[in-house]
Amino acid sequence: MAKYSFEFKKKIVTEYLEGKDSSNGLAKKYGIPQGKMVRNWISNYNEFGDDGLRRSRKKVKYSFEFKLHMVELYLSSEVSYQDLAFSNGISNHAILTKWVNDFRIAGPDALRPKKKGRKKSLNSISKKNQVQSVPDLSTVDTSTEHVKQLEDELLKLRIENAYLKELRRLRLEEEALLKKQRESSTASEETSN
């Protein structure tokens, strides 16, 4: 996707607001692939002013709780991504779309911050284990973050277990039905002979 300058976006939004052309007409006139992009610029401008058209150079970090709250708001209300994002100060509604899709695929864990850096190799882990003594097993991590992770994992496992039980029940039901059909077909063959 091409990046457009602030001045270019402002020029198009100004033309639209002055009533010179429609969003689709402006998109066609200036070689923008979709009129939807122009409509997004207009919405951003109406909501945030000039800042809505500027490309943000700073990376905003959102907390896990905020992301989860936004996803729950979206799923429990009939508000569009764009309206919900604007009402909560998020200028790019696509990030809200990503959070909702990630939540639907992987649950709440998908919204948690990811660890940065490279994963440790097996060699460095085994060397580290040789140097360290046996850890004290009496200490238990009871931090709220850890408890929350365990609760999320438990929920996933319960869902997976219920799914597998249902799958097994359906498979057994299907096998019983096939067995009945075989018995009835052999019985009908015997009576016809």
Image (cartoon, rainbow, N blue to C red):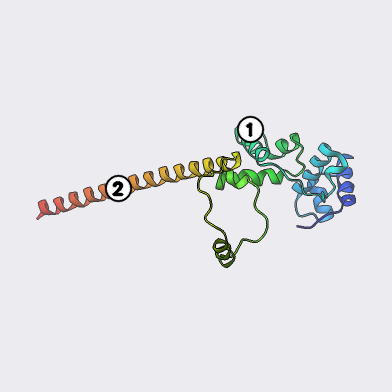
Residue placed most toward the observer, 84 or 1? 84
Name the residue beneath numbered marker 1: 78
Residue occupying the point 73% across, 45% down? 61
Residue occupying the point 39% across, 47% down? 164
Which image quarter holds the N terminus?
bottom right
Q: Is residue 58 visible?
A: yes
Which label is found at residue 172?
Answer: 2
The amino acid type of the residue labelled 2 equals Leu
Image x and y of residue 124, in percent: 59, 65
Q: Earlier in the sequence, mark 2 or mark 1?
A: 1
Assign a secondary structure to mark 2.
helix
Which label sits in the foreground, 2 or 1? 2
In space, the residues marked 2 and 1 are separated at their CA atoms by: 40 Å
Q: Residue furthest bottom?
A: 123
Q: Is residue 20 visible?
A: no
Which image quarter holds the C terminus?
bottom left
